Image (spheres, rainbow, N blue to C red):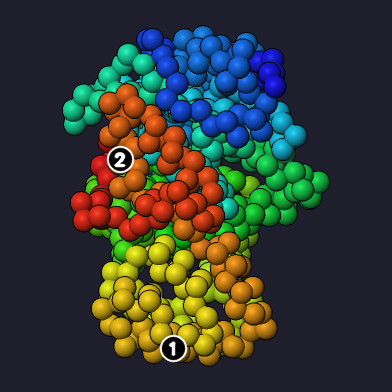
Amino acid sequence: MTHPIPNLENHFSNLGDKFSTAVQATAIANPHWVIRNASLAKDLHLDLFGQQADSFLAAFSGAQALPSSQPLAMVYAGHQFGHYVSQLGDGRGLLLGEIATTKGRFDLHLKGAGPTPYSRMGDGRAVLRSSIREYLAGEALHALGIASTRSLCLTSGELSVWREQQEPAAMLVRVAKSHIRFGSFEYFHHTQQYPQVKQLADFCIEHYYPALANQAADQRYANFFEQVIERTALMIAQWQACGFAHGVMNTDNMSIIGDTFDFGPFGFLDDYDAGFICNHSDHTGRYAFDAQPSIGLWNLHALGQALSSLISEEQIKIGLNHYQPYIIASYSAQMRAKLGWLEAHDEDQTLVSELLQLMQGSKADFCHTFRQLSTVATDDRQHPLRDSFINRDGFDQWLTRYQQRLKKETRTDTERQSAMHAVNPKYILRNYLAQQAISQAEQGDYTELERLATVLSQPFAEQTQYEDYAKPPPDWGKRISVSCSS
Ligand code: AMP
Ligand code: MG
């Protein structure tokens, strides 16, 4: 079905010029589609494949803005690796406008759209390599049920840019309910623009937390902060439970609605290593996998400070005190589901941490181990998974206790196994899979990228024709640490 080109709304732009700068995109010459997300395009009623395809290609490669679009670069600041940077802002991305759908209003954001007043020393561009990674990651997390920005399409054309070498450039259309970051609040707070802090908070409440709108002012902003804390805690608990490392949890990469946001050198765990550092530039492990929950709290402290003209110190403290119990409860619930437990029992936490220790000792594949546990029957004497462990006896002993624990539950093996299959993915975005799709794409062949996107859109399904995509990486593809350059 074809749809006319929709009118974009521009609520954020209406906040005024303290919040953003109007900028037109700089086109990529001779553009073509790299990939289009048919299902998201359908949800948004965007006719990317039919009569309007050329207009969208022109818009999403920066040549000709959509009618009614008022492209703008948002201003923000942020703590990068713990250090405050007083002004950042969209240096290479533009908010094109908002699109109203039956599922609410969504921002369309064009990343890699050329220089803006916030580009600092950068060229305003994004390389194809990192754009593909972001495209795949947003959709992969979404399919796993984890809040994330989505990916509508990628375009490329006659443009290469210099990173460590010449690389093809691309533009990504990112879709999210919000592009407001913790760092957006930090910018206004640290420049003492307190009316703008309030204006931004009111905007967030109106558009993303409308249930708070009618609360008394002395509670409304504190509750806003608490809800951001809850969403952030839930998101990070889900990352921990699926083995996702974000890699650059700077406060400018933290979404005010708790979406996984701004993908850089992220990584999904292959073999389990609690201290996995996916970011090549993260020498101290600030953003290591197991540091993410505490960094989440650190970032929320920074947000609390940025909201201190609206909420009292006491309210900030109360909010922050909720973070730890909330993330622990969320994580425990996720791990219970992964292990097939409906009830909560005293020994659960010990069983989980002993399993993770065994996995760490044997470098067992994170995704594969949990998926395989879904096939355990309560009266199995042994399970083939033992062969993935160096300490086989240790695994056998753990398995016996796990089976005893399972017997406290009322579900049959079959019921439990299918529930476990629905929460333990078979397919994740392994770095080496992304790398294969990127290498082909850099030669102009996007078939592998399409295939991988298709596989990852159903991470829990048995896709028999794609068995290979569920395999742990070959030696060359293990522990790829990704460069920050993008
Ligand atoms: P990121 O590491 O992608 O989260 O970006 C951090 C900041 O640097 C943001 O303000 C970006 O807009 C900016 N930035 C990153 N890469 C570029 C680039 N190639 N050109 C201009 N600005 C950039
Ligand atoms: Mg960023």
- Residue 154 seen anywhere in this rendered image of the structure: yes
| Amino acid beneath label 2 | Gln
Mark sitting on residue 381: 1
State the SS at label 2: helix
Asked whether, in this view, residue 154 is left or right of residue 85, the answer is right
Asked whether, in this view, residue 348 is left or right of residue 485, the answer is right
Image: 133 above or below 277: above
Q: Quadrant of the C terminus?
A: top left
| Amino acid beneath label 1 | Arg
Cα distance in 3D space between marks 1 and 2: 39 Å
Residue 303, how many percent across, how many down?
Answer: 52, 49
Earlier sequence position, callout 1 versus callout 2 = 1
Task: Look at 50% across and 12% down and name the residue there.
Answer: 58
Quadrant in which ligand 1 is drawn: top left
- Which of the 4 image quadrants contains residue 395? bottom left
Image: 359 above or below 11: below
Q: Which residue is mark 2?
A: 436
Q: Closer to us: mark 1 or mark 2? A: 1
- Which of the 4 image quadrants contains residue 372? bottom left
Residue 178, how many percent across, how many down?
Answer: 59, 37
